[in-house]
């Protein structure tokens, strides 16, 4: 068993860290305050090859793996979660195309994402359907050679800036199984009847675009169907088994960044005539942070490594997602605590990291859903 990363992977980490440390700090507070997507920085990241590294060479990507995508996510999130999310989530949803799209769809739709010419997303959640994916109500009715789509989606990443979205729709409401009623359809955002309203005043990752989507008689060609009719639910479950892994890396990166801020602060801050770092209570906090971070990193790297080898283990991925999410929230909380009153001020990055941390326990599957997946693997379904 070899836990050593390859030289190429180490180079990717080094390059990602240098890019993030060199570019993110000057924009981080402004993007958080204005809730602005850093478009110029996203394009630069594309030019340097950081975006969509898991996309195969045949479709314009570098043909690396989800592990490499995770390594970049960790380094970016270590410096600023908001900017990191906005840049690397520009390809979110492309996994559906690569996993289930036709050869023609892959060749037509994937290259522009790597080149920085297009942004995509995945539209699943609805106002009344979150974790219960199979309760979505957005309808796609086949009329001649077109699907006519009506419904609403909520909390959609890149919803107001994307060029196209992969949308989960109900296509067969009469199917005997509720899980056989859905299909995945690509919708271009410039089509008549598509409307996106940017959601503002989020708790965290404010540089990342989030929107509510309204679909009113949106007409798309039936060639926009991705995968098999009636298999949309199953396709998205496979999709999540790939995308949840990089959320784990986001959480570990955020936790690493928060811990490093705490370490710097406790070394510099003096109370009772000596640095905070000299107190055993402080040392215990740092030791616990480091241990949880290292455990989370090992979990997600193993899960990603297996995904890249076609050995998808949903329960392991859920373990990694739950544990790393909890780690990010705990570490950010303790890191802020070590800053004392300074951590409560927006001038200090830890305040932003604290707000950013909560999302990793919510999106791409809440921690409760992850625990259900783990328990069902061990106990069976009751």
Image (cartoon, grey):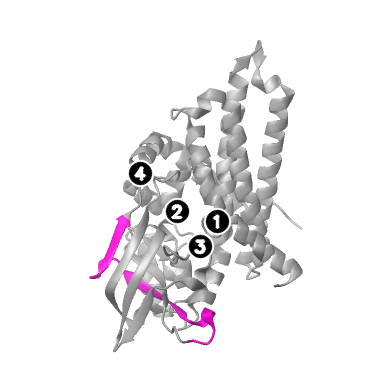
Q: Residue furthest left?
A: 192
Name the front one of labels 3 and 1. 1
- Is residue 258 left or right of 140 when viewed as pictured? right
Q: Earlier in the sequence, mark 4 or mark 2?
A: 4
**Which label number is shown at residue 35?**
4
Name the front one of labels 4 and 2. 4
Q: Which residue is mark 3?
A: 54
- Is residue 178 left or right of 199 when viewed as pictured? right
Magenta-drawn stretch contains 193: yes
Q: Residue at x 44, y 77 (%)?
A: 101
Asked if labels 4 and 3 touch by Cβ distance under 8 angstroms, the answer is no
Q: Which residue is mark 1?
A: 246
Q: Secondary structure at mark 2?
A: helix
Q: Earlier in the sequence, mark 3 or mark 4?
A: 4
Q: Secondary structure at mark 4?
A: loop
State the separation of the CA atoms marked 1 and 4. Answer: 23 Å
**Which label number is shown at residue 218?**
none
Picture coordinates of residue 12, whole percent (x, y):
54, 50
Q: Which residue is mark 2?
A: 88
Picture coordinates of residue 309, whole percent (x, y):
63, 68
At label 1, counting other C-alpha atoms closer than 10 Å, the crowd grade (few under 14, some 14-19, many 20 or more) is many
The stretch in magenta equals: 175-197
Where on the picture, by quarter, is residue 103? Answer: bottom left
Up/down of 330 relative to 269, above or below: below
């Amino acid at each position: 068993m070899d836990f050593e990363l390859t030289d190429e992977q180490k180079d990717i980490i080094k390059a990602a860290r240098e890019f993030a440390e060199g570019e993110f700090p000057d924009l981080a507070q402004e993007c958080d305050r204005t809730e602005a997507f850093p478009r110029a920085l996203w394009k630069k990241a594309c030019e340097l090859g950081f975006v969509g590294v898991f996309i195969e060479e045949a479709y314009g990507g570098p043909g690396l793996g989800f592990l490499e995508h995770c390594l970049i996510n960790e380094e970016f999130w270590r410096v600023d979660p908001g900017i990191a999310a906005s840049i690397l989530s520009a390809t979110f949803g492309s996994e559906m195309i690569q996993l289930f799209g036709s050869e023609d769809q892959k060749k037509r739709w994937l290259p522009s994402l790597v080149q920085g010419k297009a942004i995509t997303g995945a539209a699943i959640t609805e106002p009344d359907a979150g974790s219960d994916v199979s309760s979505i109500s957005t309808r796609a009715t086949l009329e001649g050679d077109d699907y006519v789509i009506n419904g609403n989606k909520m909390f959609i990443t890149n919803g107001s800036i994307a060029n196209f979205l992969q949308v989960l729709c109900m296509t067969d409401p009469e199917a005997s199984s509720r899980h056989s009623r859905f299909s995945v359809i690509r919708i271009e955002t410039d089509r008549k009847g598509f409307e996106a309203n940017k959601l503002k005043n989020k708790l965290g990752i404010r540089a990342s675009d989030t929107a509510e989507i309204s679909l009113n008689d949106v007409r798309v060609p039936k060639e926009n169907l991705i995968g098999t009719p009636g298999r949309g639910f199953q396709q998205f479950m496979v999709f999540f088994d790939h995308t949840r892994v990089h959320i784990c890396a986001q959480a570990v990166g955020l936790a690493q960044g928060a811990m490093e801020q705490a370490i710097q602060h406790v070394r510099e801050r003096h109370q009772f005539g000596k640095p905070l770092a000299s107190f055993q209570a402080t040392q215990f906090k740092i030791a616990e942070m480091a241990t949880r971070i290292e455990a989370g990193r090992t979990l997600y790297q193993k899960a990603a490594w297996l995904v890249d080898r076609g050995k998808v283990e949903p329960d392991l991925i859920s373990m990694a997602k739950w544990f790393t999410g909890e780690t990010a929230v705990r570490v950010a909380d303790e890191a802020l605590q070590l800053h004392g009153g300074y951590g409560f001020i927006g001038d200090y990055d830890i305040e932003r990291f604290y707000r950013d941390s909560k999302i990793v326990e919510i999106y791409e599957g809440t921690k409760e859903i992850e625990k259900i997946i783990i328990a069902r693997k061990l106990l069976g379904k009751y």
